[in-house]
Image (cartoon, rainbow, N blue to C red):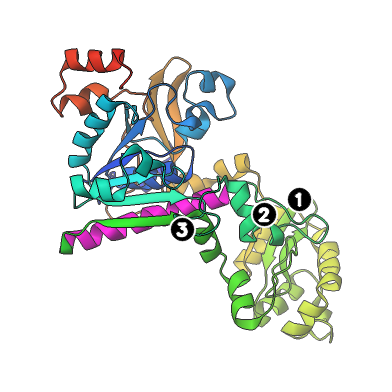
Amino acid sequence: MTEAAASAVRPPADLLAGVRVLDLTNVLSGPYATYQMAMLGAEVIKVENPKEGDLARKLGASPALNAMMLGTSFLAQNAGKKSVTIDLKHPDGKALFRDLLVTADVVVENFRPRVMDRLGFGYEEVRAINPRIVYCAISGFGQEGPLSANPAYDQIVQGLSGVMSITGDAQSAPLRVGYPLCDTLGGLAAAFAVVSALFRRQHSGEGAYIDLAMLDATISAMGWAVSNYLIAGVEAQPIGNQNTTAAPSGAFRCADGQINIAANKQEQFERLCDLVGLSALKTDPRFAEREARKANRAALNALLDDALGAQGAAEWEDLLNANGIPAGRILSIPEILAHPQIAARGLIHEIPMGQPGLETVKVCRAGYSLGDSQPAARSAPPLLGADNAEIFGALGRDTAVLETLKAGGAI
């Protein structure tokens, strides 16, 4: 670890210490939500199907890890958690889960609506067992409405939400965002909602029911694209790598790659013209004023591309930022992960894994730090059922009972 990275790493955060979360979720939206809680010190217990566990255990770029049920998709957001196995359809599994619910503060599930009701663990049933429970149900479309029963994956929500309609340009749209945006937004919203409910419970003693829809969370996060239509009646259009609110603001070509430049203010535009050798544009009627620049965006971009081709993207990045013009190279994922900024922030966390062929695992911390601590996973992503003995033993099930439950398929 570099000196900069070491200085960025603080003790693990414990803001949620003492909070027990039962994580019944799979793949991404729910696991990402509970990962945020685990990094803040909550005890997150993944309650997994004994036969297969979280589907993400078999998903990822490494077939070898998928075969080990440690797929990279699972490793990415399950560090710091514990794993127990319970068949929620088995009578003995139901009894075990009821006992576990008594000890919990939070339940998070992302089954389709009504599945937990059919299993006997809908909110009303769980609240009867533990009135202080914070129960978060994550689904694609929420528990009510004409789409509520539909199955949902991230791409389905990207399409329905309007995200794909404004991604890309006139030729390529509709286009999928290159990572599971809606799952991630849903997970962040769920984590925020759960922690808010826990804060209220601290004062009132009340539990809560949270109906989290990925579609709702995505549309809520679309900001100007939605408000421009709701308030001004203007429908967002796909404009590729350009920023619809200003010009020049978008991606431009340099000698060796592309760079984003956001000269959104008048003084930034004028300074940019001077720096790239196009001072005459400051008084050109096509570009002198903000709205004129937006109307003549294509002509302005072509002139800037020609001028920026004189140097590499890194040189322009340094020069423009030094002069108060926001600019940044367009990097690949390997390039940004190797960037000194990431090391200085201590964003990547390496955790001992201790598995053959996987001695350590690198995961991302949360995207923020605290003054005296840092959200971070305290342990590696768990093997399936690794914590059965610890968690179920504390509920009064000794080794002989656990063997019987396992032989009967309850765990």
Which mark is on residue 329? 2
Mark 3 or mark 2: name the one nearer the start of the chain.
3
Write down the residue under mark 3.
144
Residue 391 x, y percent position in the rendering: 22, 28
Quarter of the figure that contains the C terminus: top left
Q: Looking at the image, do the residues carrying marks 2 and 1 touch, with CB atoms under 8 Å apart?
A: yes
Mark 2 or mark 1: name the one nearer the start of the chain.
1
Helix, strand or loop under label 2: strand
In whole angstroms, how far apart are the C-alphas of marks 2 and 1?
A: 8 Å
Q: Is residue 185 magenta?
A: yes
The answer to whether residue 98 is visible is yes
* Front label number (3 vs 2): 3
Camera-side residue: 227 or 81? 227
Residue in view at x 55 percent, y 52 percent: 182
Magenta segment, which residues?
A: 179-202
Residue in view at x 67 percent, y 82 percent: 266
Q: Looking at the image, do the residues carrying marks 3 and 2 touch, with CB atoms under 8 Å apart?
A: no
